[in-house]
């Protein structure tokens, strides 16, 4: 009978199924992979790349920082998978921290390698950090903050929405690297006293970090960097004044010869703290108070401008305002030479609201 000849084959297939054998590749099942949320890149003593991440980021197991050292990122990822019993995947990477020395050397080749992985999004947050980042991560996990990577991602996402601190992702960074009239910036963090603190803005010439804007000056950098924004707190220590909820607007114009750029900064907000004895209970006193604060803010803004010109970087994209519908007066090289020596005129106008003493005086009248 023909059917009898097929019985051994059917029996073998049945045994394979019942025995749990399968020809399906299981390497991508949930149980076998570990998505990476955070990457930290540092330089090795021999010029190698040290790649660190937290594993496992999403499973209820004891977490730790795993580090590999290799000549390339691809090799580092391979070595990482040899150290861990699950295969790590990059599809969930949300942020990348670069040690300061690595940012000084240049980031384009590293980012290009990462973006060759189709799983990695160009919206990954980027940041520069100094200090013992690995020690910070380990101490956070030992103290019970095991989801430190997810916490940091939520912090970055919050800052991006608020717009008060510098944030940048891979797409924004590379867009400015190849923009002939604007230089990239990244947030600058420091590890100190077991805290990861926002410490200002890292300034780049091309893809190489060349300096920073310190934290005390960073709020004024944001006024120049963003066309419109809101700063919750603007401290002016020299005047013993703290401004709050300041709405900012920036306007840029050039002279016909492009030898001078005019930057108008319009501010509107309120006073959170004033020095003892300061009187603002009349219109004249309030106006004098506002003019004094305008001068203080203008000095701060000029300091930031001087800093960027001394480093030959244009993080504000002022060069883009020279481009007209039919003409581009400067090449990238020409603008790089013109910006550091350009005359910059800054005008600040400040309008204070709800000063308290003035409002009560007006009510009595």
Image (cartoon, rainbow, N blue to C red):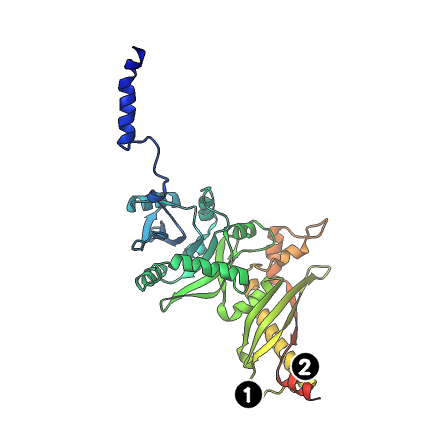
**Residue at position x 29%, y 55% in the image:** 62
Q: Nearer the viewer, residue 5 or 291?
A: 5
Residue 306 visible, this orientation: no
Task: Name the spot of residue 60 as percent of width and height, x first.
Answer: 32, 53
Give the quadrant of the C terminus: bottom right
Residue 305 appears left or right of 191? right
Give the quadrant of the N terminus: top left
Residue 161 falls in image quadrant: bottom right
**Residue at position x 40%, y 53% in the image:** 38
Q: Nearer the viewer, residue 221 or 141?
A: 141
> Can you say whether 3 is above or below 271 in the image?
above
* Residue farthest to the top, as pictured: 1
Residue 148 visible, this orientation: yes
Give the number of marks: 2
Mark 2 and mark 1: Cα distance apart in space: 18 Å
For label 1, the residue is 276
For label 2, the residue is 287
**Is the residue under label 1 in contact with that under label 2 (CB below 8 Å)?**
no
Residue 320 appears left or right of 71? right
Task: Name the spot of residue 107 as percent of width and height, x first.
Answer: 46, 51
**Residue at position x 65%, y 52% in the image:** 330
Crowding at label 2, few (<14), some or many (≥20) Cα neighbours within 10 Å? Answer: some
Residue 87 appears left or right of 241? left
Task: Name the spot of residue 112 as percent of width and height, x first.
Answer: 47, 45
Q: Nearer the viewer, residue 132 or 125?
A: 125
What number is the disc on residue 182?
Answer: none
Label 2, secondary structure: give it.
helix
Crowding at label 1, few (<14), some or many (≥20) Cα neighbours within 10 Å? Answer: few
**Residue at position x 42%, y 54% in the image:** 102
Label 1, secondary structure: give it.
loop
Task: Name the spot of residue 335 as percent of width and height, x first.
Answer: 62, 55
Q: Nearer the viewer, residue 164 or 339?
A: 164
């Amino acid at each position: 009978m023909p059917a009898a000849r097929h019985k051994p084959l059917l029996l073998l297939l049945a045994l394979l199924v019942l025995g749990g054998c399968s020809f399906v590749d299981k390497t991508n099942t949930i149980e076998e992979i570990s998505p990476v949320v955070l990457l930290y890149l540092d330089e090795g003593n021999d010029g190698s790349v040290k790649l660190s991440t937290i594993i496992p980021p999403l499973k209820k197991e004891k977490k730790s920082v795993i580090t590999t050292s290799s000549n390339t990122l691809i090799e580092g990822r391979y070595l990482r998978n040899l150290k861990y019993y699950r295969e790590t995947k990059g599809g969930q990477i949300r942020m990348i921290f670069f040690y300061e020395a690595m940012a000084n050397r240049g980031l384009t080749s590293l980012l290009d390698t990462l973006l060759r992985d189709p799983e990695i999004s160009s919206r990954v947050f980027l940041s520069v950090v100094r200090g013992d980042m690995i020690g910070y991560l380990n101490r956070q996990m030992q103290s019970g903050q095991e989801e430190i990577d997810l916490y940091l991602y939520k912090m970055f996402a919050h800052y991006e929405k608020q717009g008060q601190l510098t944030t940048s992702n891979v797409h924004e960074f590379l867009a400015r690297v190849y923009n002939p009239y604007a230089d990239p910036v990244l947030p600058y963090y420091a590890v100190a006293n077991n805290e990861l603190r926002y410490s200002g803005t890292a300034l780049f010439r091309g893809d190489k970090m060349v300096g920073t804007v310190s934290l005390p000056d960073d709020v004024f950098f944001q006024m120049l960097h963003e066309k419109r924004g809101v700063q919750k707190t603007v401290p002016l220590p020299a005047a013993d004044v703290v401004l709050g909820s300041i709405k900012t607007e920036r306007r840029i114009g050039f002279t016909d010869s492009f030898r001078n750029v005019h930057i108008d900064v319009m501010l509107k907000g309120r006073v959170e703290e004033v020095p003892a004895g300061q009187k603002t209970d009349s219109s004249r006193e309030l106006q004098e108070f506002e003019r004094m604060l305008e001068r203080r803010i203008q000095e701060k803004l000029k300091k930031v401008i001087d800093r960027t010109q001394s480093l030959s970087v244009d993080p504000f994209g002022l060069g883009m305002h020279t481009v007209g519908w039919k003409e581009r007066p400067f090449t990238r090289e020409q603008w790089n030479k013109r910006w550091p020596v350009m005359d910059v005129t800054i005008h600040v106008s400040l309008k204070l609201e709800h000063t308290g003493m003035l409002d009560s005086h007006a009510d009595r009248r």
